[in-house]
Image (cartoon, coloured by chain):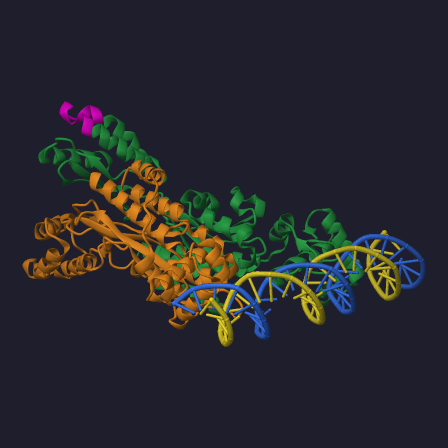
Chain colours: A green, B orange, C yellow, D blue
Amino acid sequence: MDDRKLAVLRAIVTDYVRSREPVGSRALVERHRLDVSPATIRNDMAALEEEGYIAQPHTSAGRIPTDKGYRLFVDRLAQVKPLSRAERGAISAFLAGAVDLDDIVTRTVRLLAKVTSQVAIVQYPVVASAVIRQVDLIRLNGSRGLVVLVNSAGAVRQYHVDLGDCDDGDLVGLRDRLNRTVAGLTPGQAANRLGGLIDQVEPESRPLTANLVAGLADLLGGDPTTRVVVGGVGNLARFADQFETAIKPVLEALEEQVVLLRLLGEATSEVTVRIGQENEHANLAAASVVASGYGDSDESWASLGVVGPTSMDYPSTMASVRAVARYVSQILAEG
Amino acid sequence: MDDRKLAVLRAIVTDYVRSREPVGSRALVERHRLDVSPATIRNDMAALEEEGYIAQPHTSAGRIPTDKGYRLFVDRLAQVKPLSRAERGAISAFLAGAVDLDDIVTRTVRLLAKVTSQVAIVQYPVVASAVIRQVDLIRLNGSRGLVVLVNSAGAVRQYHVDLGDCDDGDLVGLRDRLNRTVAGLTPGQAANRLGGLIDQVEPESRPLTANLVAGLADLLGGDPTTRVVVGGVGNLARFADQFETAIKPVLEALEEQVVLLRLLGEATSEVTVRIGQENEHANLAAASVVASGYGDSDESWASLGVVGPTSMDYPSTMASVRAVARYVSQILAEG
DNA sequence: TCCTGGCACTCGCACTGATCGAGTGCCAGT
DNA sequence: ACTGGCACTCGATCAGTGCGAGTGCCAGGA
C-alpha cells in the first residue's frame, strides 16, 4: 500500500471522526497538505474502496471508513498522541484523593467517562498472588450460618450455609480446622487441600463439612472477582439520532456483567482495540471497545476500557485509556 | 369537580398514554361512551385547561394531560387493576428460583423492568432489627489491617485500617474487646457503647482504638446499606425522539446511588407515585417514579420502583410494582 | 507512468408553496 | 345545559425544484 493512499485513509478517518459526515476529495486536499489535486485523490479513494477500507453511503456522497479502514488506521497510522501536561495533572489529581478500593474504582470510572466522553467500564482488580488470611464461620440465627473468607488483599467474600444441628463448640472447632487447612494458601492450593478435609473430621460433622467444602471450592474456583462498574452512559446522548440501531443494543449489553467481562477481554499491558464486528457480541457490531489492563505489577490485575462508536477518535481515546490505566496502577501500587 | 369532567380527564389520560398524541374532542366521544356531543366535551376541556389539568401543545391540536392532571388521575381515578392470573404466576415463578439475596435482587430488578417495560430500581433490603454478630480485626500485610463487621442478617461490611506497630497479641485482645463491646447490639446501641471503649484500653493502644472506633462509628451511623441496582435501561428506547430532554438527564441521574435512594424515597407499604416536577431532582422533571416498600414484615425493609415518562400507564405500572413488591416480600419471608 | 484539469452525470438535501384535516372557540337554537 | 353549525388556526404532508457536493472518466501534460 503506497504512502499517499495511507495518508488519504488517515485523512478520511480523522475528518470523518471530527465531522461525522462523509468526506469528499476536495475537502480532503483543502484540509490536509496533500499537494495533489482532488482528481488524484479520487483515484486513490476508488482504490481504497475497491480494497474495502472505505465506503460510500450512496452515490454522490463522500466516503466513510469501514471497520477494516479503522482497523488499518489503528494498526498502522495512529501515533498515540501524548496527553498534555494539564490533562495528566487532572487525571492524577482526580485519582489521588481516593481513600479505598471502592473509591478508586468509582473515581476511575468517572474519570474515564469524562476524559473520553464515552461509556467507561472498570473491572475490580483481582489480586492474583493474594493468599487466604482467614475463614470465619458465624451463626446468624438458628441454623442459618455464614462463611466469610478474607484474603491478604483485603477482599471479603461470603456465602450462606445451613448449619444443621451443629452446636457452637463444634462450630468453633470446624472453623479452626478450616483456618489451619487454608490460611496462608493461594486459592488454588486451598482448593486442593480442602478435598482431604472431609476424612479428618468426626463422622457427625461430615455433612456440614462437605457443605462448607463445596461452598468454599465454588468461591475459590470461580473467577476471583467478577465485579464490573459502568459509568458515563449519558455520553451516548451524542448518537441519539441512531438510538435503535446504535444505543439500545449497547445499553442492553452493558447490563450483563458477563458480557462486560468478555468485552474487556484478557488484561494486557498494552491498549487493545476491538472495532465493530470484531466484538464477539452482536449488540456491539456498531461499537468499538478500547481496553487496557491495569494493576500493581503482577500482583493485582484487571481491565478497564471504554465503549464508543466505531467512529471514535482512536488516538485520543487510546491515549486517555492508557494514561488512566497507568495512573490507576500507580495509585494501586502506592496504597 | 363534576363527574363528567373527571370522566373526560380520565379519557384524555388513557388515550394519551396509549397513543402519545394529543387527543381531541371527537376522538374522545368516539372511543369512550360519553353520550354527549364533541362540543360539550370541548366546554369541559376548556374548563379543565383553565384549571390546569390539561394543556394544548399548540392551537388546533388536541389536549395532553399536565402533571397536575396525572396527579388527579392517579389520586382519584385510577382503580389499580389486578393482574391476571397468568401474570401473577409468571412473577411468582420468576422469583421462586432465587438462591440467595443477590439473586433475589437481581431477579427482581429484571422482572420489574420486564413487566413494566420501564427502568427498574431495587434497593437491597435493610434488616432494621439485625444485631451485630461479630467484629473481626485481621492483619493483611505489614501494618495494613481490615475490620470486618457481620450482622445477624448476614450482611458483611469492611474497611481498611492502619494497624501501626500493634503486635498480633494486642490485635487479638483488641478484637475480643471490640466483640464484647458490640456483639449482640443493634447498630445504634453499639455506636453509643463504642464511645466509652477508648478509656478502657491500655494507653499504647489508644491511637489504634480511636481509629477503629471512628471507622466503626461511620459504618454503624451511616445508612445501613445504600446499594441500589438498576435495570432495563434499554426500555428508554421508546423515547429516543426526545433523547436530549427526556433520556439523557434520566441516565445521568441513574448513575448516582444517592439520587436513586432519594428517588425511591421512604419505604411505605403502599405504592407511591411522584409525577414530573414532584420529583426533587431536576433531571427527572419529565419523568415519574412509581415506588413501593417491600420486605419481610418489620424485620427487613427497602424500596423498589420504576422510572418512566410522565405519560406512563399508571394503573398497570402501579399494579405491577405492587405485585412484585408483595411477591418479593413473600420470598424474603420464606427464605 | 503518474498526475491533472475538465466535463457530464448522479443524487441527496433543503426549500417552497399548496393542500389537507384535525381540532378549536363561539354562538344561536333547542 | 346541551347541541349543531360555522369560521378559523395551524401543524403535517407532499410534490416539485434547484442547488451543490461529489463522483467517474478521459484526454492531455510532466
The one nearer the camera, A144 or B326, is B326
Quadrant of residue B252 in the image? bottom left
| B287, above or below A137, in the image | below
Quadrant of image for the C terminus of chain A: bottom left
The one nearer the camera, A225 or A160, is A160
| Magenta-colored segment: predominant secondary structure | helix
Quadrant of residue D19 in the image? bottom right
**Residue A1: in sight, yes or no?**
no
Question: How far from the left and from the top, in percent, is residue B243?
Answer: 49, 60
Left or right, A278 with respect to A172, comes to right
Left or right, A208 with respect to A167, comes to right
| A65, above or below A205, in the image | below
Left or right, A210 with respect to B119, comes to left
The one nearer the camera, B208 or A285, is A285
Question: How far from the left and from the top, in percent, is residue C12?
Answer: 70, 58
Quadrant of residue B107 in the image? top left
Q: Residue furthest left?
A: B200
Left or right, B225 with respect to B87, comes to left
**Residue B127: in sight, yes or no?**
yes
Question: How far from the left and from the top, in percent, is residue B105?
Answer: 31, 45
The one nearer the camera, B188 or B254, is B254
Q: Residue at x 22, y 55 (%)?
A: B224
Q: Residue at x 10, y 36 (%)?
A: A168
Magenta-tinted stretch: A198-208
Question: How far from the left and from the top, in percent, is residue A83?
Answer: 51, 64
Q: Is residue B35 magenta?
A: no
Count of numbered labels shown in the rendering? 0
